[in-house]
Image (cartoon, rainbow, N blue to C red):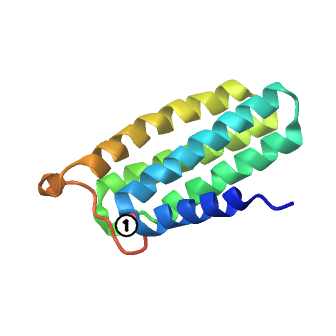
Amino acid sequence: MTNPYRSASQAYAQDSVLTAAPEKLVVMLYDGLARFLARGAAAIRAEDIAAAGKALNRAGAILDELLATLDPTAGEIAERLAEIYLFCKRELLAAQLKRDPARIERVAKLLAELRESWAAIAEAPPEAAMGRPTLGAAGAQA
């Protein structure tokens, strides 16, 4: 039997993404990233390597999306974010190979700090936009 509430919640989630400001979309990506990192670390602790691989692959896909939205003309901020995202991808690969949940948690902590910065940007009034990262039509760009 199909759950009628499931399709309603999916529609709401899809609507939230389609109508969100670019800065808010970045925050949503970070939220998803945190969920998959937590799942990955928990799965490694439970010795469920398949589930860990699935969760960490999804986290890697989100990092790829964050990398793809960076605007290379934005200068040093975009360069630093790219370096951080690539570092995180390397750390997650190493964590998966070595089955090290602590490594995943360190990445999660680093990304949580970035998420808080993006959340502050997303919640700032429009007149505070001076000097913040550029955001383009393809998504949030820094």
Residue 28, given in percent of the width and then of the height, sits at 49, 52
Residue 118, given in percent of the width and then of the height, sits at 36, 47
The residue indicated by pointer 1 is: 71
**Which of the 4 image quarters holds residue 23?**
bottom left
Disc 1 residue crowd, few under 14, some 14–19, many 20+, Cα 10 Å: many
- Asked if residue 46 is positioned above or below residue 50 in the image, the reply reads above
| Number of disc labels | 1
Residue that protrudes farthest toward the bottom in the picture: 137
Residue plotted at (88% across, 35% down): 48
- Asked if residue 133 is positioned above or below residue 68 in the image, the reply reads above
Q: Amino acid at mark 1?
A: Asp
Residue 139, given in percent of the width and then of the height, sits at 42, 67
Name the side, left or right, on which 92 lies relative to 142: right
Residue plotted at (55% across, 50% down): 86
Residue 99 in view: no
Residue plotted at (41% across, 41% down): 114
- Asked if residue 30 is positioned above or below residue 8 in the image, the reply reads above
**Which of the 4 image quarters holds residue 120?**
top left
Q: Secondary structure at mark 1?
A: loop
Tell me the quarter of the image containing the N terminus: bottom right
